[in-house]
Image (cartoon, rainbow, N blue to C red):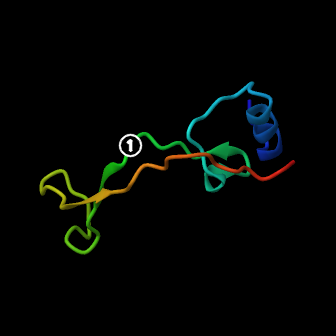
Amino acid sequence: MIQSSKTILKKIKEKELIIEPITPSQLQPASIDLRIGNHFLTIDEYSTPLISLVKPATYKEIYKDHFRGTATLPSI
């Protein structure tokens, strides 16, 4: 079932849906962006212009600090 951001926010405030930690920027029009870690890889677009099964791709490593603390969500 697709939920609107208003419905998702209501479920979070009523503790029917619990996502911790969460920031206001994670709330989208009909979804929530989930973060499962602070380290990920992305293809280096400058070194790997085309993805191929023959030639390995070059990746960039990205590290982000975890969000810690309390988030203030927008009111309904």
Query: The residue under label 1 is which amino acid type?
Result: Gly
Residue sticking out furthest to the top: 16
Q: Which residue is mark 1?
A: 37
| Residue situated in front as seen by the camera: 65 or 58 | 65
Which quarter of the figure is the N terminus placed in?
top right
Q: Secondary structure at mark 1?
A: loop
The answer to whether 43 is drawn above or below residue 21 in the figure is below
Residue 27: image location, x then y, percent: 67, 49
The answer to whether 14 is drawn above or below residue 55 in the figure is above
- Left or right placement of residue 58 versus residue 16 in this view: left
* Residue that appears at 79% across and 43% down: 4
- Left or right placement of residue 10 versus residue 21 in this view: right
- Mark 1, Cα crowd under 10 Å, few <14 / some 14-19 / many 20+, is few
- Left or right placement of residue 17 versus residue 34 in this view: right
The picture quadrant where one finds residue 57 is bottom left
Residue 48: image location, x then y, percent: 22, 67
* Residue that appears at 36% across and 48% down: 38
| Residue situated in front as seen by the camera: 58 or 8 | 8
* Residue that appears at 82% across and 37% down: 10
The picture quadrant where one finds residue 14 is top right
Q: How many marks?
A: 1
Residue 49: image location, x then y, percent: 26, 70
Residue 30: image location, x then y, percent: 72, 45
